[in-house]
Image (tube, rainbow, N blue to C red):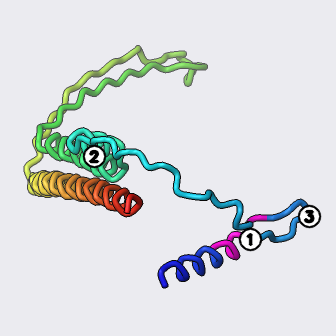
Amino acid sequence: LKLLDTVRKLRESSYKLSLYLRNDMGQPMVPDDNWLAPRFPPIGEIPPGDFQTDLANALQRRPEIQLIELDASRSTLDLQLAQNQLMPQVDLILENSQDVGDPASSLRDKSRYGMEAGLMGSVPLPRNKAKGKIQATRAKLNQFAFKRELQSNKIGIELQTARNGLEISSERVKQ
């Protein structure tokens, strides 16, 4: 019964493949049964795997982890900005002036070259906004750490599941 079901599925797959498999004239072509291998190719032993090494490689290559890291670095920059907004502000101001061009009066007088320099400082008194931003950003960074740990655990489970599937499939072929 299982053999007949498998033969039926093989033929159905052949018919579906004929949508893409064409002869020289461009007509659909159903694959011939003699195209199949007479038996399964020899299956070698599954190479031993080191879970920790595989997990470390997967964590470096998976885009989910990289996206979380990018979001965390963006939040780190937001934290630095909020901390900077708590600090006093100091501005250096330089101005210079000199009349140029044709004389403006019959006395042919122009003002002398002038330069002014100044230093202006301010301390942000209502600092609640910056403090709130710091707290919110630190909470976000903690959230990213938890997301990264959860995603790492998910990737580890995917690796274990894939290895288990490989071992079960190998046993099935041997049987």
Note whether 100 is above or below 37 in the view shown: above
* Image-quadrant location for residue 144: bottom left
Q: Residue at x 65, y 76 (%)?
A: 11
Q: Residue at x 11, y 39 (%)?
A: 87
Q: Which residue is mark 1?
A: 18
In the rendering, at what x and y percent does residue 129 appear? 14, 56
Alpha carbon separation for disc pair 2 and 3: 54 Å
Q: Does dot 3 land on a helix, a strand or a loop? A: loop
What segment is highlighted magenta in the picture? 13-21
Q: Does dot 1 land on a helix, a strand or a loop? A: loop
In the rendering, at what x and y percent does residue 68 appear? 28, 51
- Residue 25 is tagged as 3
- Mark 2 vs mark 1: which is more N-terminal? 1
- Mark 2 vs mark 3: which is more N-terminal? 3
Q: Is residue 16 found left or right of 99 in the rendered image?
A: right
Circles 2 and 1 in contact, beta carbons < 8 Å: no
Circle nearer the viewer, 2 or 1? 1
Alpha carbon separation for disc pair 2 and 1: 46 Å
Of the pair 137 and 116, the residue shown nearer to us: 137
Residue 113 visible? The answer is yes
Q: Residue at x 31, y 24 (%)?
A: 94
> What kind of residue is marked 1?
Ser
